Structures are given as C-alpha cells and as structure tokens.
Amino acid sequence: MTKIVVLAKLVPDLVEELEIAPDGKALDMMWLRLLINEFDNHAIEQAVLLKEAVGGEVTIISPDAEGVDDMLFTTAAKGADKLIKLVGDFEDMPNNHALASAFAKVAKEEQPDLILTGVQANNDLDGAIGPLVAKELDMPYVGYISGVTLEEGGVIARKEYPGGLIGEMEVKLPAVLGIQASEEPPRYVAISKVRQMMKSAAIDEHDVPELADTGGLPVNRMYLPEAAERAEMIEGDEDEIAAKLVELFQEIGVM
Amino acid sequence: MAMPSATQSPLFTKEFYTSLFENIDGENIKTCLQCATCSGVCPFGHVMDFPPGRMIAWMRAGILEEMLESDSVWMCVSCYACTEVCPKEIPVTPSLMTRAKEEVLLAGNVPTELQSALEFSQRYGNPLGESSRKRAAWIEDLDFEVPTARKVRRPVDVLWFVGDYASYHPRVKEVTKAFAKLLKALEIDYIILGGAENSDGDSQRLAGEKGLFEVLAEKNAKAFSRCEFGEIITTDPHAYNALKNEYPQLGIEYPVKHYAEFLVERLEEIKPLLKDNGKVRVTYHDPCYLGRVNDIYDEPRTLLEAIPGLELVEMPHNKTTSLCCGGGGGGMWLDGFRWEKAEARLSEWRMREAASTAVDVLALACPYEPPRFEDAAKAIKGAEDIVVKDIIELLVEVMEE
C-alpha cells in the first residue's frame, strides 16, 4: 500500500491587513489570521486523488497554529486517513529550515513512499519546505509539479516549465514532490461532513521538544512598501550605461 | 486509527424521494399531475436535463442515478416561480430543488465559482471574500455617525441587519448609505452589528449548503443576543427571509421587517420630506424573496407612489409572475456556469421588459439587483438610458436639495 505524507502549513491570510510587530522585524502575530497555504491545499488534493486512483494511505502533518484542527478535520472529510499535529514552540512561526527538520523527523516515522507539499508559500523567507525536507531525509526532490501518476516503484511527475512546456519524468520512490497544482481543483466538502469528522476523527499530537536553530535568515527590518523617489534612468549607449552602473554599484558597496 | 470514509456518491435513492415528504407540505409531491407547468415557468427549464416535473417522474419510476450525471440543479435560481404556479401546491423550490442541491453538494459536485463563495462565507462570514473587519467600513464615507453595537451600549428600538452585498459591494453600498441617511432623517433609534454581523446564509442554504447556513445563523444569533433591541430591519429580502422563516426553525426568533414594511409604517413622516423633482416614469421589479416568497407586493409600490411626480407603471411580468434577476439560489456565484449552459442572462430578459415598458427608471428593493440590472441595461438595446435604482435611493434623492 502506498503511503503518502502531505506536509501542510498555515500561512498569513492576505485578505486581512498585515501589521508589523513592534520590533519591526516580523509580522505582528496578534493581528494575523491564518489559512492553509494554497499550494499545500493542492498537495492535499493530489494525495487524495492518488488514493482514489490506486489506493493507499494519506497522512497529513501540520505544525500547531490557530485553526489547524479545523484544517486537519477538513482534510479528513476530503479523504485523508491520518492527521498529525506537531506540538511545540510554533507560536512565532519558525523559519522553514527549523520547520523542515521537524517535518522530516515525524514524516520519517511514517515510512512514506511519497511526500507531497506545496511548492511554495507566501512566508517562505529561507527557501521552500520541499527541498529542505528532501535533504534531511536524503530523498530526491522535484518541484513545480502539476500532475502525478503512481507506477511500480516510482511516479511519473509532470513539471511545468516556462513557455508552456511540460516535462514528464520518472522519479524513484521514496521522493519529495513540490506541488504547484493538483490535477483537479481542490474539492469542496460540505460543512456537515467536516463537523462529522470533528466528532469521529482523531488528531495525533507529536511533541517537538526543540526546534532546530540552523538556517533561517536574520531579518533586519520588515516594512510595508514605501513610496520611493522615482527611478533614475541612466542615459547613453551600452558602454556608458555599463560604466555608470559599475560606478553606482561601487558607490553603494556591493561591488 | 480508523476513520469513516467520506461518502462519494449522492443519495438520490428511494430514501431521497421519501425524505421529501418530511418538508412542510412535502407529501403533496405524491399528488403531482405531471402537468409540467413548473418546467414551463422555470426561467432555465429549457436548458435543464431534469426540470422539476421530469425529476419527479423519474424518481417515481425509481430511476435516480441518471439525474446525478446531470448538473441541471445548478441552473435553479430558487425563484419560486414553479412553486407559485403548482396546482397541487408542491413545495418545489424549498423541498425538491433545495434538497437535490444538498445531495449533489454533499457528493462534492460543486461548480468551482460556487465553491469559492461557500469557502469565503465560511472563512470571512461573507461570500465576497472580504475581510470581516471591514464589514462596516462603508460608514466612514458618511459625514454623520452610524451607531454600532460596540459603541451604543443600551437598548435600542431597531437593529439594522445590513447584509453582505449591502456592506461590501461598491454599487450596493450607495443604497446602504442612502438608507443610513433616511434613518437619520426619520430619527430612528438603531444600531448595526458591524464586524460581528455574518452573512444571513440564506442563499448558501438554497445553494445546498445547509450546514454552512446553520453555522452562520448561530454566529448571528450570538451577536443578536449581546444586544437589546425591539425589532430587526434589513434592506435585503434574502436576509429578511432567513430571519423571518428559517432562523426561527433554529430557535432564533426576532421580529423582522423588510425596509419597505418599516418605511410604509412611517409614510406620514416621510411624505412631508419629499419634494417634487418633476415627472418620472417608473416601473418596479418584485424581488423573488420579497414578493413570491413573502407576499410583500404593495408596500414597495406605496413608497414609490408617495414620490411627487412619479408615475408607476407595471411590466408584463409583475407581482406573482415577476422574473428573477438571476441572483437567487447561489446565482450570484454561478454567473459563468449559467452563461456557459444557457447563453442567456435573466437580468437581460427583465431589462428588455423594462425597455418595452418605456420607463425612465427601474426601481428595486434587493441588494443583489442594482449591479445585475445596471450591467443588463448596458447590454440591451433601448435600455441604455434606463436608470437603475433602489427605492431607497429614489426616496433620498427627492429629500435632498
């Protein structure tokens, strides 16, 4: 039986206005509303589609956050078999290196054949989750996937390239795939079904006693876009423009 | 850990047919004459694989699965035209069509457009996907204060349930602001709920999402219970219908009036405020949920006739035969889907009638309508110059200098 693990996280909801924390280096969590990362939602749909096509078991792993239980129960109503919540110091939204390390440890216990996750998220400051998890588990990774077919010992993954090209590639399992889009749009489940799951399904809590302190980027300043002065257009032929650019780069100290 | 598997196939079984008997007057379905009046009067009956009459025939014959292959139910605008004309008084809209949508939705067969509106309603408390914190942002455009429940901490006469489109839609907000002016002019002691208000949920219910309707109703009930007021008023016939007929079934009972009823009660106070701005020829479009569903036909007309110089004329379809604007039963969120199926817009059909009636103004009383009919006016020859306005706007216009 194919074991599929989906790594999903909640991210800031951009419908709500974002506030900067008093230290000026992060979003103010107090005013933040969270929702499932759209790409992770596609990864969940892809996992359920695979299960419906060839059978298998789908496990969803997500770090603790406000609203995560509802999100997990919704995935159960869609067809997920097992729900795991990572419990620990997740209040301030850890960086992706720390989160990937926590994901990898718990995912490994599940002995998955295939790990799916969203290819990106709106709060990825230090790289996407997929490749980081793949490195931790020493598995191959392919991102920007918009279609997956399970075969004996592997999958055929369809990857989008610029210019409207699609590549099909064989990937040996176990592997991690970064999902750009599921083959069908994520399905709707009636609220009554989600409520039913709240009564009948269970969420396994996995303690994450300590978050890895490697990786991550020190944020110096986080701010809303500011109206700036108009761009300076450099005039002249190619050589003159290049010379002026070099001069400017030296001036601001990046060259 | 074992989990129950989610049902994937809809339940159009014998049990579905017999479950219809449980609705109010549901047993009348047994007496269906197969006269097909329902299918004939249905504005989208001609494009449905299974218009109501045929659905009943096939269910009686025990052939249920074929109905599932079809997405006809999503063409139903819940306009009650079928229910109005049925000689055997079968509750076609509230029972058969709504229950059929529920089953199809439970099976996960939901058009994508509709899906977003339902997800937004669940998450933000409105189908437009706007922040719930900005629900009362329209009051900032006014140069007087609109009292919110948070600020006014005392019993009031009236709670104004503003509603989704009235709160967020740029065109409909103009009507909302006009209504605030009218309440101020009449010195009504009222509050609005602001961010604590949620969608009334009626159109979501009629689009088959009963569970969502109940969640939204519970949230509104909680907000109502924190305030003290004499009655609820609303400009939205859908909210009116929910509060009047559906919420009581959930134990949420408050006296409620549509603004037309509320204002007619104050007609003698309103009349002296209205100036004569010259002759104008006006027709009135009966919203489904004010007219056919709740039998309110006279009050909106009484308000219009109070306007000096206004000549009220009727379109060929009026009162019980009024045409649907296309927004009901989830129609606000199925425009693309329905255009693909029918290549017709109900609002344009209505606008053709308004043009043939040679009016200056099409008067409305529902927040779904101004944007739908304004768009239709642009598309219909002869309707380009017809002004589309809510009755509230027409009243406030003749009150101002």
Image (tube, coloured by chain):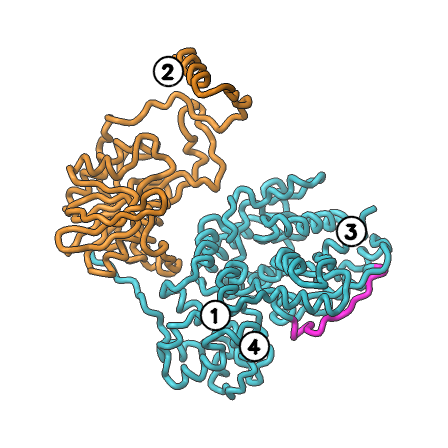
Chain colours: A orange, B cyan
Q: CA distance from mark 1 to mark 4?
A: 13 Å
Amino acid type, mark 4:
Cys
Q: CA distance from mark 3 to mark 4?
A: 37 Å
Instruction: Name the residue nearer the viewer: A116 or A163.
Output: A163
Residues under numbered marks 2 and 1 in contact, where contact means CB atoms less than 8 Å apart: no
Residue for badge 1:
B98
Q: Quadrant of the C terminus of chain A?
A: top left
Residue to which mark 2 is pinned? A254
Q: Is residue B205 left or right of residue B14?
A: right
Q: Quadrant of the N terminus of chain A?
A: bottom left
Label 3 packing within 10 angstroms: few (<14), some (14-19), many (20+): some
Is residue B319 one of those drawn in magenta? yes
Q: What residue is disc 4 on?
A: B82
Q: Secondary structure at mark 2?
A: loop
Give the residue type at disc 2: Val
Magenta-drawn segment? B308-322
What's the amino acid at mark 1? Thr
Secondary structure category for the residue under label 4: helix
